[in-house]
Amino acid sequence: MTKTKYLIIGNSVAAVAAVSGIRQVDADGDITLISRETQHTYSRPLITYLLGGKVGEEQMAYRPADWYEKSGVNTMLGTEVTHVDPEAHTVDTAGGQTIGYEKLLIAVGGTPIVPRDVQGADAEGVFTFTTMDDADAIANYIEEREVRSAIVVGGGLIGLKSVEALIELGISTTVVELADRMLSATFDETASTLAQRRLARAGVEVRTSTTVAELLSENGRVVGAKLTDGETLPCELLIFAIGVLPATGIVQGSGIDSDRGIIVDDGMRTSAEDVYAAGDVAQARALLCGTNRCIAIFPNAYRQGIVAGRNMAGAEAQWEGGLVMNSVTIVDLPTISVGVTEALGEGYEELSQLNEVALSYRKLVLHEGRIVGAVFVGDIDRAGIITGLIRERIDVSEIRDVLMSDDFGLISLPAAYRERVLSGTVNRR
Amino acid sequence: MKRIRICEEHCIGCGLCEVHCVVQHSRSRNIIRAFREERDGIVPGVKVERDGHLSFALQCRHCEDAPCIEACMTGAMHRDPETGAVLCDTERCVGCWMCIMACPAGAVQRGASGKVASKCDLCIGEDVPVCVANCPNEALVLEDDGDD
Amino acid sequence: MPEWLTQAEFVIERDPERCIQCKVCVRQCANEVHRFDAELGEVFSDSDKCVGCHRCVSLCPTNALSVRQVELDFRSNANWTPQAIRNIYKQAEQGGVLLTGMGNPEPLPVYWDRMLLNASQVTNPSIDPLREPMELLTYLGAKPTRLKYEGGDEPRLETELGPQLELQVPVMFSTMSYGSISYNASLALARAASEVGTYANTGEGGLHAGIRPFAKNMIVQVASGRFGVDADYLNAAAAVEIKIGQGAKPGIGGHLPGEKVTAEISATRMIPLGTDAISPAPHHDIYSIEDLRQLIYAIKETTRYRKPVGVKIAAVHHIAAIASGAVRAGADFVAIDGYRGGTGAAPTMIRNNVGIPIEFALAAVDARLREEGIRQDASLVVAGSFRCAADVVKAIALGADACYIGTGALVAMGCHLCQKCYTGRCNWGIATQDPYLTRRLNPNIAVRRLVNLLESWRHEIKEIMGGMGINAVESLRGNRDHLRGIGLTDRELNALGIQMAGE
C-alpha cells in the first residue's frame, strides 16, 4: 500500500490552492495528488474559450508545466477514487490500489446535471460541458458532422459561455431557459434584460419559460428538440448546461456528512477526522446569510483550498465566509455581480443607475447600512472596491450619497478602512 | 520585498506620478513622444484620487494574500519570485475581469485594448518605481519590509 | 468696472512643442492662471493673474513653461517707474493701502556687498577647518564683566553665569509666526533648529502643541498683542523675546485677518475663532524705557531667571540710544531688525521707506555699547537680510553675536519671493493656511533642506574663518579690522568703523 502524508483528490482550483497552502507551512511533507482527469491542471473556465478558438491548448494550463515538480507533488492522473475509508485513513482507486494518508482533501468539484426525464437524451451529439475532454469531444463532433445549428439548454453562466463559443465557430445557436429570463440566478431583471439585448444583437435566439421535453434523433444523432411550450427546434448539436451538483458520490458509504455538498466547518474540516473538503464539492459557511451553502465560485474555491491546506499542515487558517461573485463578459459586454443582487424584503434598499442605450447599469443593494450586493453591466471599473466593502461589512451609511457618483473611489470611504486597503492587508488571513 | 507606502497627508494631487508612469510604460520612454504618439495605448498603473483638498495616488498594493491571484482563472496573475511584485502575464490573460472584481483597492484596470488586465508592475527593472522617484512631495515612499 | 488699467506683471511662455497637456500646472496654480479647455484639448494660461511664483515652472515635467517679467511699453522713465504707475492705477481703481509681503526690494545699496573680508597670507597662516578644530559655538545672554575663581589644584568658577542660549552655529531662524506661515513650515523650522542645535523664534503666533516637543530650541515672543502668552508658554521655551519693533514695518503693528484665524490658530494664539488678530503698534503697557524694564523683569520673575529675556527692535534713527536703553533695562540680548527684513504682510509704503540698513545699525549699536562699557551685558542678534554665509561672517565681524535668517529659511523651503504672502495663496505651502496648499510643504523635506542650508553655511563660515587665520568665532566677533570697505564714502566708512580696501 502506498502511503503519503497529504493526499489530495482533485486537480483543479481548490487542489492547486491546497498545495500552496500546505507548502506555506510544510516545505517537505509528501503530497500526492490524484485525479480522474488526465490533463495537467487546467483552467476549467477556459474550456469554452478553447472550444471557440479564443485560446489554444498551450494556454489552458493553470500552472506552469514544472509546477508539480517545483511544489513537490506526486501526481496520479487519470485515476479515479472509488472509496474513502476515514477510519482506516485509506482510499481505494478504480484500478484496485489502496493509498494511505495522514491528511486527506476531497476537492473533486461537481458533476453536470443531466435531466433524467428527457427522452432521447442518449443520442449522439448531446453533451454536457464541464471538462477539457468535453471541449475536445464537442469540437470533434462539430468538425465531423459539420454542425451548423445548436441548442444550449440552460441560460446560466455555463450556458452563456457555451453559446459564445458556438457563435465564434459560426454556429447558429438558440438558448432555452426554464426561468422567465436568462442568468436569473446571477442578475436582477434589468441586468438580464441588458444581457439578452446584447445577445440578440449578436444573433442569438433565446427562448425563456420553457425547456426541452424530448430530443429527436436520426440515425442515432440528435436533429432537434421538442420544447415544453410546444415549439420544435432543429439542431445538430445540443449542450445541457442546466447546472452542476457537488460530486458527493465519493463519500457515499464513508460516514462523512454531506448535504447538497460535503459539509465543512470554518477550517474546511469534514465530519471525519483528518478529512477536509474544499472547492465546488464543499458546503461551507456563506458570508452574508451565515448558513452553509455550496457557492461554487472560483475565488471561493481557491481560498478554501488555501485554508484547507494550511489546516492540514497544522497552521491556523479560518474560512471567512463565501460570497457569490461572478465576472462574465457577454459577447463584448463586461458584467460583474456580487452578493445579493435584489432587495430581499424589508430593510433592503437599492441604488441604481441605468443607461439603456449604452447598455450600462450599476446597482447596489444595501441592508442595514451595509452593501450586501452589486451588479455592474458595461461599466465595471473598480468594481472590486464594492466587493471589498461587502466582504468586510463596512458601514456605508455616512457615505450613502456618494456611492453612485462618478467620483466615487477609495477617497470616499471611511479613513480607517481606506488605510487597511492601502496597506494591502485587507485580504490577509 | 519592496512596497510603495502611500502618504496621504503629503499628496498634493499634481498628477506627476501618472505622467511618469505613462512614460515608463511607453515604447519611446521619451515624455514628449509618449504623450503625443502613445498616450491612448497606455493605462497608467497609478491613479490620483481627489476630493476637495484631499488626494492620494493609488497603485496596486502587491498584497501578500493577493485577491487577484486567487481570483485569476488562467494563472496570469502571479507573483514575481524575485521582487515579490504581483504581475499580470498578458499572454495568458483572457480579460475575464475576475481580478477587477476581486481587488478591494480597485487597482486593476482594463487595458487600453480592452482585452487584458492592466496594473502597476512596480516598474520591473528599475531600482525605484518612477512614481516614487518623481513625486515632488515624497507622498509615495519606497519601503523594504524584508523578505517575506 | 473692469480692471482695464491694471496690467499683468508677468507673462507666461508655454512652448507648444514641449507641452504635453498633462495639466499639472492647472492643478498647482493657486491663482488659477492655467486652465484646460476640454474641447480643444489644450491648456491655456491667463498671464494677468500670474504672480511670478514659478510653481508651474518648477513642476512642469517637460520644462515647457517660463515666466517673464513684463517690461511694459511705457516710455522709459526713471522717475515714474512702471511700478509707481501701476500702484497709482491700483489705488485709483480699488482705493486702500497697498499691501505687500517679504522684504524691501528697492535698489538701494546693499552694504554687505560693499564690505570685503581678509585672508591670511605668509605671516599669519590659514587654518584648514577639515583638519583642525574650529569653534563656532556661540552663547547668547548677559556675560559677566569679570570671572572669579576659587583657587586650588582644580580651580572652580565662583561667578554665577546668567542663563545662556547655546548655538552650534551663529545663525538662528528668525521670527515667523504660525498664522503668517503654515503649521508645516513652523514645524519644520522648529525641527531643523533642534536638529542643528540652534533656535527658531515662534513670533507672535503662540506655541502650537505640535511644536511643544521642540520648545527647548524655541525662542518665544511676547509681542504687543500678547498672543498665546501665559506662564506655561514662557516657561516651556528656551528664551523669551519682547518684540518692540520689526524691520519690515517699524512703528506699526500687525494684522492677521479674521478669515485666516482658523480653529488651530485661534487655539494657539488664544483668541476667538474668526476674529482679526490685531497687534497694536505700541505695547499698551510700555510707554517708557522704565515700562520696558518692568516687563523684562516681570518675565524674568515668571521664568525664575532661568531663561534669557531679550528685546527685539527695528533699526531706525537713534538706534544706538534705543539699544543702549534696552540693555540697561535688563535685556539679556537685543535683536535688531534692519529695513530689509521680511514680513507676511505690510503696507508697501512703510516696508519700502521706513527703517535703516542693519549694517549701519549694527555698527552703531556695537560701538555705542562698547563705549558705554556695557557690551557684555547683552548679546547682539541681527536680522534683516542675510543671504549667504559671507553676510553672516561680515555681520559678526561688525559686532554681532548671531544672525537671524527669515527670508533665507523660507527660500530654502521653496519660496520664490513673489511677495504675495498677504493673499494667503502661497503656492509653495508656506505663507498660507489653505489646506489644499499647506500640504505642499512636506515637513520632512523642509527640515532636510533647512538643515542642509545651515550645515552648508556652517562649513562655509569655517572655511572663511580658516582662510582668515582664525579658529574661534570669538576672534571674529567685533573684529572690524577683518573688514575693508569698497565703493563707500568716507562717512560711510566711518559709520561702519572700517577701513577702505587697500588700507
Image: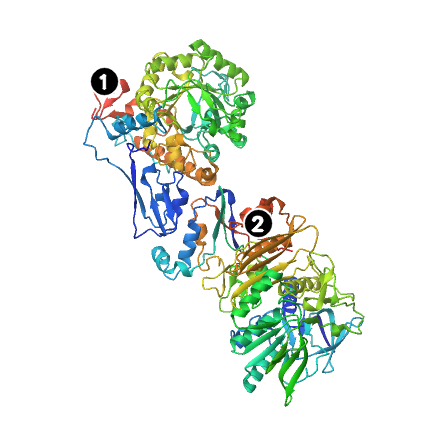
Q: Quadrant of residue A86?
A: bottom right
Local crowd size for mark 2, using a 10 Å CA cut-off: few (<14), some (14–19), many (≥20): many
For the residue labelled by badge 1, is the local secondary structure a helix, a strand or a loop? helix
Amino acid type, callout 2: Leu
Q: Quadrant of the N terminus of chain A?
A: bottom right
Q: Taking B81 as reference, is A110 left or right?
A: right
Which of these two is toward me, C479 or C23?
C23
- The image shows residue C398 at horizontal and vertical percentages of 32, 23
Q: Chain of mark 2?
A: A
Relative to C395, say whether A146 is above or below. Answer: below
Q: Taking A123 as reference, is C456 left or right?
A: left
Local crowd size for mark 1, using a 10 Å CA cut-off: few (<14), some (14–19), many (≥20): few
Which of these two is toward me, A363 or B114?
A363
Which of these two is toward me, A31 or A232?
A232
Relative to A97, say whether C386 is above or below. Answer: above
- From where the camera sits, is residue A426 visible? no
Residue linked to disc 1:
C491
User: Mark 2 vs mark 1: same chain?
Assistant: no
Q: How many marks?
A: 2
Residue linked to disc 2:
A403
| Contact check, label 2 and label 1, Cβ < 8 Å | no
Amino acid type, callout 1: Arg
Q: Quadrant of residue A270?
A: bottom right
For the residue labelled by badge 2, is the local secondary structure a helix, a strand or a loop? loop
The residue depicted at 35 percent of the width and 19 percent of the height is: C315
Q: Taking C198 as reference, is A256 left or right?
A: right
Distance Cα–Cα, label 2 vs label 1: 76 Å
- The image shows residue A427 at horizontal and vertical percentages of 61, 55
Q: Quadrant of the C terminus of chain A?
A: bottom right
